[in-house]
Image (tube, rainbow, N blue to C red):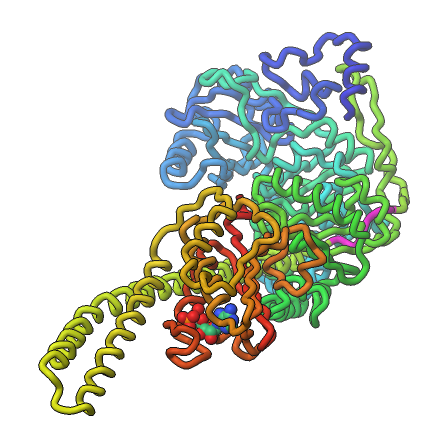
Amino acid sequence: MSENLTKDLQGSIAAPPGWHTDPSQPYSTKRHGLTITNCDAEPVRTPGCIQAHGALLVLRASDLSILQASENTQAILGHEPRELLGHSVATVVNEEGAIRLRNILATEPTDRNPIYAFTLPPNGQVAALDVTLHTIDGAAMLEFEASGRSRPATRHNPDYYSFIKKSVARLQTAETMQEFCHALAEEVRVLSGMDRVMIYKFHADQHGEVFAESRRGDLDPWLGMHYPAEDIPKPARDMFAKTWIRPVPDIRVELAEMTPLVNPDTGKPVDMTFCALRGVSVMYTEYLQNMGVSAGLTMSLRRDSVLWGLIACHHYSGPHYVPYELRAACEFLAQVASLQHRAIEDRENAAYRLRLEEVNQQLLSIAAQEGGLASMTDGEPSLLGAIDAGGAALFHRDRWWRVGQTPTELQLEALGLWLVARLEAGPVVSSVYATHALAVDYPAGAYFADVASGVLAVPLSRSGQNLMMWFRPEVLKTVNWGGNPHDKPQVTGPHGARLTPRRSFELFTESVHLQSAPWLQVEIDAVARLRALIMELVIVRAERLAGLNSDLARSNEELDAFAYVASHDLKEPLRGIYKYAHQMMEAMPANEDEKRRLDGLMRLTLRMDSLLDSLLHFSRVGREDLTLENVDLNDVLADAIEMVASRTDDGRTQIVAPRALPWAMCDRVRVREVLVNLLSNAIKYNDKDAKCVDVGYVGAQEAPLRSAFPAEANGQTVYYVRDNGIGIAARHFDQVFKMFKRLHGREDFGGGTGAGLTIVRKLVERHRGQVWLESVAGEGSTFFFTLSAADDN
Ligand code: ADP
C-alpha cells in the first residue's frame, strides 16, 4: 500500500468504535479486525483468537494450571472458561491426562513443536478429541480438535506409513523439477483428499506461480498462473518459514477469542505461531472465499531452510477437516520434499554443471598463460564457452574486453561504476550480482535492454578494478495472472477503511518487457566458482613473483657479500706473495731467467691486487646506501672533469657541455663516479689527434631526439657522454658491461681492470636507471644513462 494512500485515508476517516488504535492494548482479530493502518503489519502471530472448530488452553508450564481458555470451551470441552481459569488442567483431561502431559513436558522436545499427547474419549455431548501439546515462552499450549481416530475408516488407506513410503519412493525417481513437483502435488492430493493441490513457487520478486498442479477433473486448470506478491504478504511468508503446515478446515467457521486476551503471568498476548488452530487473518479468509475456496491446507517447501514455495491445497465443496494424524503425514511429505529439492535440482542440471566446470578449468588455463585474463575474451573457449548468454565483458587493465553481443563501451563504463558501488554497498563485497530485469535496478539499462536485460556480474578484486559480466537479451513474453495484479481494491468494513483482497481471479494477460530468461542457480554457482579460481590464480602469481624478487635480492646480496669477503681476504696472502718475491729479488736472482720470472710474479700480484680492489669497490657499490639529494649536475660534472685532468692535459683533448645540465635527485658522489668512468674511457679509448668529448642530456619532452631510446627511458631525462674515439663493434655492446671484460690487451690504451663499466651499470641501477650505448667502430661511442630516482621526485 502506498504511503500517500495510507495518509489520505487516515486523514479523512475517523476511527470508528472498536477500531484497534492503541497498540498498548491487546489485539484480537475478531474484535478489532483489520484496518488500513495495520494491514501491512497484521499481528499474525498473536491474533488473540483461534478457529472455533477446536479449543485452546494456555497452561502455566510449571503447575499445569489454566491461564487462558478460548471462549468456546463449553461447546468443545463441556466447561465454560470461567470454570477452567485458575484450575488444574485435570479438570478437563482428568488426573491421568495431567500425568501424561507432565511426562511429555519432562521427556519430549515440546518447545515450538506440537506433540500428540492422547485422544480424549467421547463424553456425553463432547466428541473424541485429539490433544496436542507444545511450549512457547514458558507457557504450555494445549490444543483440542475432533479426532480422526474415533471416526469410521477414512476413504484412504489409514496406514499412513506405507502410503508415505510409496510417495517418497516415487519422488525419488523424478528426473526434473517439473516431474518432481507434479508427483508431489498428486501424492498430497491423494493423501489429504483436497480438491486441488498446487505447488506454488515464489519468484525472486516474491510473486508466485503455480508450477505444478493436481486437481479434481471438473476444476479449471491454474497451472502456469502467476499471482502478485501481495497475495501472500510478508508476515504470512515469514510464518511459513517457521511452521510446516497451516490448516484452515472451514473458511466460514467463527473465530473464538482467548479469555483473558493476555497471559496473566507475562502480561503479553500469547504467541500462536505453532498452534494448528491459530486464528486466520481476515484478509486471508476473504481471499480464499473470493476464490470460491471452502477449506485450505498449506505446507511450506524450503531449500536449505529458505522458503522456496508452498504446497497450497484448496477444497471447494464445504469444510474439510484433516485430523492431526493425517496432517502429520502431509507435513512429513513436505519435509521430505524440501530435503529432496536440492538433489533434484542438481540432477536436472548435472550435465550443464559439468560442462560449466570443464570450461571454467579451460578458461583458467588460458588466463594463466601469457595473454592473462584478457585472453578469456578472444581465446577458445571464451567466457561464452559454456554459459548460455549473448555476450560477455571483462574490465581489466583499465579497459573493456568484449565478446558477443554487449552494451557499448560507454554504456559498460556507466554500468560498471554503478555495479561496483552496488556490490560494495552490499554486506559481502564478493557477492555475485544476478538479474533478469536490469532496468528495474538500473533504469538506464532500458536503453540497451535488447542485448542486456539480464546481467550476471562478479568483481574480481575488492576495488572493482576487475569485473566480469555476462549478458542476456530481452525476451518478450506474456504472463498469465490469476486476476489483475494492479487491482488493489479497498473497502470500508465494520472496523474502518481497509484493503480487501481481489474479488476477480479472471485470467489477466500481461506482456513483459525489459526482461531476459532468468539465470539458473548452477550458472550463478559456476560464475562464483570461476571468480574464486581466478582470484586464486592471481594470488599464486603475485606470490610467485614476490618469491622470485626476494630470491633475486637475496642472491644479489650474497654475491656482494661473497665478493667483499673474497677480495678482502685474498689481499692479505697476495701481499705475502709480493713481499717474498720482492725479498728474493733483493737477494740477487741466480740468472736473468730467474730475474725475469720474479719480475713477472711481482707484476702479476700487482695486477691481481688491482683486480681485487675493483671487486671490493664493486661490492661496496652494491651494499652501501645512496644519499639522495637535489643536485646541480653542472657542479658534479665540473668535479668529474677535474678528477680526469691528468688525462686531459695532453693538449689534444677537449671536454665540452653544449648546454647546462639540469638539477637531479641523486647521490652526488655516485653520479660523479659514473661521469669519471665514462669520461676517462672516452679519453682513453681514443686514437684521434683531436679528442672530443661532449657531455649533455635529452629532456623528457624532447621527443624527436628519443626515437632510438629504449621504452623504459620514456618520460625521463637521458644523460650522455659522447666521444670520437675508437668505437665499439655492435656485437660487443653487451660484453663491455661484464666484470673484468676488456676488448683489448691488458696494457693497451693505458690498461685497466675491465670493471669500470660494470660499476657504472651498478651505480645507475641503484638509481633505478638504465645505461646503454650507441657506437660506430672507428668513429666514436655515446654512453647514455637515466636516473629514475630523480624523475620520481
Ligand atoms: P676498463 O676501461 O678498465 O678496461 P671498462 O669496464 O671501463 O674497463 O671498459 C670495458 C671495455 O669496454 C674496455 O676495455 C674497452 O675495450 C671498452 N670501452 C669502454 N669505453 C669505451 C669507449 N668510450 N670507446 C671504446 N671502447 C670502450
Q: Is residue 174 visible?
A: no
Location of the N terminus (image quadrant): top right
Residue sticking out furthest to the left: 587
Indicate left or right for 488 with 360 as reference: right
Residue at image point 39% right, 30% down:
95
Magenta stretch bounds:
512-518
The quadrant holding residue 703 is: bottom right
> Residue 553 location, x and y as percent?
39, 61
453 or 55: nearer the eye? 453
Front one among 693 and 611: 693
Q: Is residue 594 left or right of residue 438?
A: left
Give 277 or 460, whichever is nearer the viewer.
460
Query: Does 199 appear in magenta?
Result: no
Q: Residue shown at 64%/67% (left/top)?
A: 371
- Furthest toward the front, the residue is 651
Asked whether, in this view, residue 658 is left or right of residue 771, the answer is: right
Which residue occupies 54% across, 66% down?
691
Give residue 49's position: percent from left, percent from top.
62, 24
Counting labels gives: 0
Location of residue 474 in the rendering, given as x and y in whole percent from the top left corner: 84, 52
Within the magenta stretch, is there residue 514? yes
Q: Residue at x 77, y 18 (%)?
A: 6
**Image quadrant assignment for residue 522:** bottom right
